[in-house]
Structures are given as structure tokens and as C-alpha cells.
Amino acid sequence: MTNATSPHPPAAAPEPAPGLSRRAVVVGVGGVAAAGLLTACGGGSTATAPATTAAAEPAPSAPSASSPSSAASAASAASGTELTSTSDVPVGGGTVFADKDVVVTQPTAGDFKAFSATCTHQGCKVKSVADGVIVCPCHGSKFAIADGAVTAGPAKSPLPEKTISVEGDSILLT
């Protein structure tokens, strides 16, 4: 049925460009859009993160002679990251710092040790220190507070030792 009274001729469908289907055009536009999003989301964060971190850290030689607190802060920063106070680690026990991946122990008064807080069995974080052992909650492995040796499996390897230093009453991860 044609409309004979209309002054306009019937609309003809536009002819597709030779060699390109509608599907190819839609897929191509989608691919370009996806690539643009990935570039926008991923490109800037890795390039700016190191520059921001480097600019935020003070130079070790920056403290002035007129500022004793900044000199002390710089000395601590040069020595390591402060974990805790010596009074916060019980004799015959220890304290877990999961966010720093370290457990600090005090097997005997004044003798501080540090080990990785990651269990050597399957990589769980140790949870507590009790009765002279470091305890992993995942499968029950236990490690000696004096040397990180396995005292109960299923772990077969000791906890790796970490380096700490004691400056005054502060324990520093170095």
C-alpha cells in the first residue's frame, strides 16, 4: 500500500559502506571506547604514585639544628619504622603486627626477636602469641618465640627472621 497523496517520495534505506557491516562498525566503536577507558583508568595511577611518594618523604639530612624534635624524627626514620614500645611486648610472649607482616617476641626479659607474620604452611597470617609459641589460626601450626622454629605442624619451615632494633623504649623494624 503506497501513499499516493504524500508529496514526498518513500524513504529509501541508506546503503551501507562497501566492505563494512553494521556489526563491524559497532564492534570497532566498542573496542575503541574500551581501550580509552582502560587507558584513562590505568595510566595515571602508576606514573603518579612514585612521584607522590618520593616528594612526601623528607630527606634524612633535612632537620635543622633549631628543631630537636625533627632531628629525633629524622633519626628514627633513618633507623626504621617504629612498631611499638618495649613495654607492649610481654616477656615470654609477643605481639603480632599483621599490617607490617611482623611478629615481635620477647623470649626473655630484654631480648626482643622478630619474625614474618606469614605462616610458612599456606601463607595465612599468624594471629596470636600464647604459652611461648606463635599461633597460626588456619591449620594450627605453632612456632617458637625464641627462633621461629616449628613446634607443631603442618608447617615444616620456620618463620623467617626479620630485623629489628631497640632504641630507648621503641622497637623499630629496620
Image: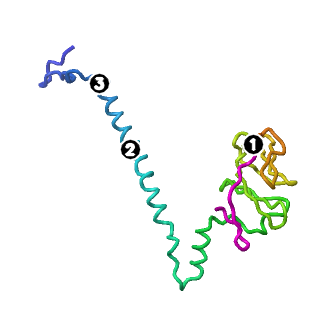
The dot on residue 22 is 3
Identified by mark 1, the residue type is Ser
Residue located at (73% from left, 40% from top) = 121
Q: Is residue 95 above or below residue 73?
A: above
Which amino acid type is marked by label 3? Arg
User: Mark 3: few, some, or many residues within 10 Å (few <14, many ≥20)?
Assistant: few
Distance from disc 2 to disc 1, alpha carbons, whole Å, reads 43 Å
Mark 1 / mark 3, whichever is N-terminal: 3
Q: Is residue 12 left or right of residue 29?
A: left
Q: Nearer the viewer, mark 2 or mark 3?
A: 2
Q: Residue 52, image x and y in percent?
A: 46, 61
Compute the Cα span from label 2 to label 3.
26 Å
Badges 2 and 1: C-beta atoms under 8 Å apart?
no
Q: Amino acid at mark 2?
A: Thr
Tell me the residue that label 1 is attached to. 157
* Relative image position of residue 49 (x, y in whole percent): 46, 56
Please, is residue 5 above or below residue 30 in the view?
A: above
Rendered position, 9 above or below 142: above
Q: Residue furthest top?
A: 1
Left or right, 8 with respect to 43, comes to: left
Q: Which mark is residue 20?
A: none
Q: Measured from the top left, where is residue 152 in percent x and y?
A: 84, 42
Q: Quadrant of residue 37?
A: top left
Q: Badge 2 is on which residue?
A: 39
Mark sitting earlier along the chain (2/1): 2
First to last magenta residue range: 158-174
Asked which quadrant contains residue 107, the reply is bottom right
What separation in Å lies between label 1 and label 3 (alpha carbons)? 61 Å
Judging depth in this view, the residue of 25 and 57 nearest the camera is 57
